[in-house]
Amino acid sequence: MVTETDLSLVNALQVDPRAPWSFVGETLGIGAVTAARRWDHLLGEGKAWLSAYPAGGVASRLAIAFVQIDCAPGQPLQVGAALAADPHIPTVEYVAGPCDLLVHVVAPDLRAVTDYMVHRLTTLPGVVRTRTLVSARMFSEGSRWQVRAISPGQRDALAARAKQPPAPPRFDDLDRQLLLLLGEDGRMSFSVLASRLGTSASTVRRRVEGALASGAVRLRCELARSLSPAPVTTMLWLRVPPDRLESTARSLATVPEVRMCAAIGGSANLLVVGWVRAPADSVALESSLVTKLPWVDIVDRAVTLRTVKLMGAVLDESGYARSRVPLDFWSPILPRLTDAR
């Protein structure tokens, strides 16, 4: 289990992932040493972690697809484990619904997504059938979700410290390398980052703060789902009138349970991921959405049985992070994946 102090610490890092321990400890009233020690414990146990990924204008230039995979009997977790090792797949979900696995594929462009599907995913032993839904736009993603264990005043103090003057948008190979290192440890010090990259700490500080301020890179603090106040993941495929797609997505972004909302191609044109307390709460979520947005049709639905990988963190059966796969979406597409069994 996690303590209230642990939940407050996770919430603080959801607001400001790289806040100095002195500031975190002062804001939470626990001291810098205690804050650092508790985080090291959570991180070492795999109960909480930081993910790093491209966002904003950088992410908008990438191609994103959601792939539904049907597997041979008894093979979903083996297929999921093989896919989890791949840097082009940030998330793998084993679900009860219209497919066995739902995976997110991210690559530089649609041609690379096609190469991935044709030369890698469909050649993996255990994969029987796939359906690919290309995302035209990501309206909201998981960094907006918080455990809400700190007070509004504490949240405001951390948010104010995190605010920085916007930096000019840029993203070159040095930024990419910094992103991959932050994927290993989102709180890696500027001096260690500089040593790993063979450059100066001042350059690294400028680049990291600029990438975070401009929204080119996002850090996200995650808590193991089994320890979360909302441990159940539910997915809805919605059909929305095209002229109401954007306004509907904006409305969904205000719903506390909604974790992600993305425009997709297919008979459904909006994919919504929500986090709820229990499976029964997914029914209440659907009811509230249809009441609030009566023009929305629910085309299909799913519930996650097990998250195999979440934004680069490979999870065990309890949902604890056991390894990391930095999200190098720009890496070459290899001829095929090998079976991880």
Image: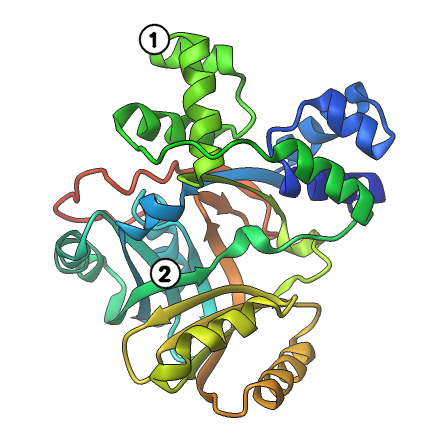
Q: Residue at x 63, y 79 (%)?
A: 285
Q: Is residue 13 above or below residue 24?
A: below
Q: Residue at x 27, y 50 (%)?
A: 62
Can you say whether 18 is above or below 112 in the image? Answer: above
Viewer-proximal residue, 2 or 199? 199
82 or 264: nearer the eye?
264
Q: State the colouring used for the structure image.
A: rainbow
Dot placed on the residue nearer the N-terminal end, 1 or 2: 2
Q: Is residue 312 visible?
A: yes
Label 1: which residue? 198
Residue 259 in picture, x, y percent from top left: 55, 62
Kind of residue at disc 1: Gly
Measuring from the top left, give residue 75's x and y in whole percent.
36, 64
Judged left or right of residue 176, residue 240 is right
How many numbered badges does the structure rendering display?
Answer: 2
Using residue 209 as the reference point, say whether residue 3 is left or right of it. Answer: right
**Dot 2 amino acid type:** Val
Residue 96 appears in view: no
* Quarter where residue 175 is shown: top left
Mark 1, secondary structure of its residue: loop
Q: What's the distance in space between the residues labelled 1 and 2, CA to CA?
A: 35 Å
Viewer-side label of 1, 2: 1
Q: Position of residue 5 (x, y in %)?
A: 82, 39
Viewer-side residue, 316 vs 88: 88
Circle 2 packing at 10 Å, graded few (<14), some (14-19), many (20+), is: many
Q: Could you say which quadrant of the image residue 230 lies in?
A: bottom right
Q: Which mark is residue 103?
A: 2
Asked if residue 341 is positioned above or below residue 189 in the image, the reply reads below
Q: Residue at x 87, y 30 (%)?
A: 29
Q: In the image, 29: left or right of 161?
A: right
- Rendering coords of residue 143 (x, y %): 55, 50
Marks 1 and 2 in Cβ contact (< 8 Å): no
